Amino acid sequence: KTGAPEKAIGPLQKALKLTPSDPDAHLWLGKAFLAQEHYQEAIPHLEMASQTDPKDIRLQYDLAQAHLLLSNQMFTKISRQNPHTYWPHLLKAQAYGLEGKLDMAVIEYNQVVRLSPKVPGVHEALGEIYLKKRDFPSAEAEFQKELDINPSDYTAVCSLADVMIETGQTSEAIPALEKASAQKPSLGCARYELGRARFRQAQYDKAEGQLEAATALNPAYAPAYVLLGQCYSKLGKPEKAQAAFQKSRALDEEHLEHMQENLAPAEPSTDQLNPQ
């Protein structure tokens, strides 16, 4: 509080020798180390402080910030030691994506691809960014590149099918989804996308079974219940349709409540992730 965190470290360490479980001493010692950019030392103390009240978002935020800054410190070191590595770009791309800075995420993911074109998952992540930007041709191209690298990436299969269905290529999407579902019956996303495809083709009886499987495999995915309710309506099953719609609304309300409970203060800027 006095603006001299280095002077607080010694007394706080002595206090913890006398009372090792003092959460306030752990908190302030963690903050002092954080202010000194000693992130590795800060994290254990902030973890101890956060355990006293797991629902205190401020304590969780302090801990998350320390981990973020430590990651930045480590990747900055890697970047300086080896300027041709893709890892710092990958970290920044992921952070930009989480913050919704999609154009910046695209730039960093493309840097990863430039440095190492076949890093697993990167084309898929880039495809997801393009999907959020509603750039369907670019998204389709990236998902296909991911499958060229790893044909058994079932998540990429689902994502590619999502784009194809969205762009009117429903018939073309079905064979890959059927193959994925047969190879991995527990793959909920393939069941859902196959249900979407059959629904688009007005094959409601076939869509019904796939969507029921999708909701059984992923009971918390509200869009599957919406589409299943619509399917039941088309098949003349109003009671089942109502139940599906009610389940979807309940999940949406639960999600909203969870979001409100976990509102956090502003996160550190991704600018902190830029190596100097």
Image: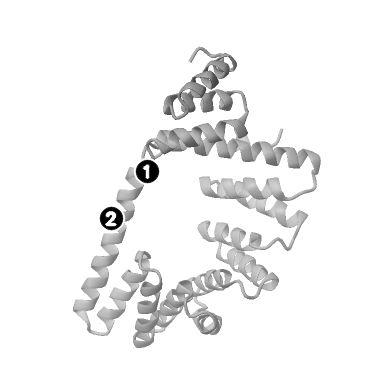
Residue 142: image x %, image y %? 63, 65
Q: Amino acid at mark 2?
A: Glu
Task: Decide if residue 229 is in sight here.
Answer: yes
User: Which one is in front, 173 or 263?
Assistant: 263
* Residue identified by numbered label 2: 253
Residue 109: image x %, image y %? 66, 53
User: Which one is in front, 177 or 163?
Assistant: 177
Question: In the rendered view of the protein, which quadrant contains the C terminus?
Answer: top right
Give the Cα distance between marks 2 and 1: 14 Å
Q: Amino acid at mark 1?
A: Asn
* Residue identified by numbered label 1: 262
Secondary structure beneath dot 1 equals: loop
Q: Is residue 153 left or right of residue 218?
A: right
Q: Estimate how packed mark 1 is, as few (under 14), some (14 to 19) or many (20 or more) residues with alpha carbons within 10 Å.
A: few
Q: Is residue 250 left or right of residue 10?
A: left
Query: What residue do we see at 24% from left, 75% from top?
Result: 241
